[in-house]
Image: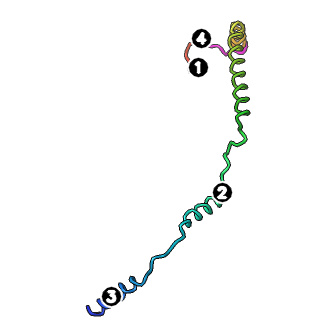
Amino acid sequence: MNKKDTHKKVEETFKVLDTIDKVEVNHFFKHKVLQKIQAEKVEKKPVFSWFTPQLQLATLGIVLLLNIGTIFYAFNSSSQRDSSTSDIKTFAQEYSLQTDSSSILN
């Protein structure tokens, strides 16, 4: 190819560009497309949709009652701890589980 052929092809390409007209678009085209996209969009349901505020409040109440019950049980059973430690010592003596050393590893 020589320079004359290349120059001629470039000129033809530019002539084609001059023949392209501006595309007229409806003013509401973007609005219509966005509405169609919005209509097609699948709405995801939340995973915990069943965990309504009423159920959350009931769950909170149950957890608080369990915590209060545990605290009362812990403070009321402090008098029984003395007897339970003696029961453990008796059990250990009966089955020869006591050692004379105070090592944790034994």
Q: Nearer the viewer, residue 52 or 96?
A: 52
Position in image of residue 3 (x %, y %):
26, 91
Q: CA distance from mark 1 to mark 4?
A: 10 Å
- Quick one: label 3 or label 1, which is nearer the N terminus? 3
- Quick one: label 1 or label 4, which is nearer the N terminus? 4
**Looking at the image, can residue 14 be seen?**
yes
Local secondary structure at mark 1: loop
| 5 with respect to 45 (left or right) | left
55 above or below 16? above
User: Quadrant location of residue 16?
Assistant: bottom left
Q: Which residues are magenta?
A: 94-99
The amino acid type of the residue labelled 3 equals: Glu
Local secondary structure at mark 3: helix
Q: Given this view, does label 3 or label 2 mark the residue nearer the observer?
A: 3
Q: Nearer the viewer, residue 4 or 30?
A: 30
Q: Which residue is mark 3?
A: 11
Q: CA distance from mark 3 to mark 2?
A: 51 Å
Circle 2: is it few (<14), some (14-19), or many (20+) Cα within 10 Å? few
Q: CA distance from mark 4 to mark 2?
A: 72 Å
- Quick one: label 1 or label 2, which is nearer the N terminus? 2
Q: CA distance from mark 4 to mark 3?
A: 107 Å
The amino acid type of the residue labelled 4 equals: Asp
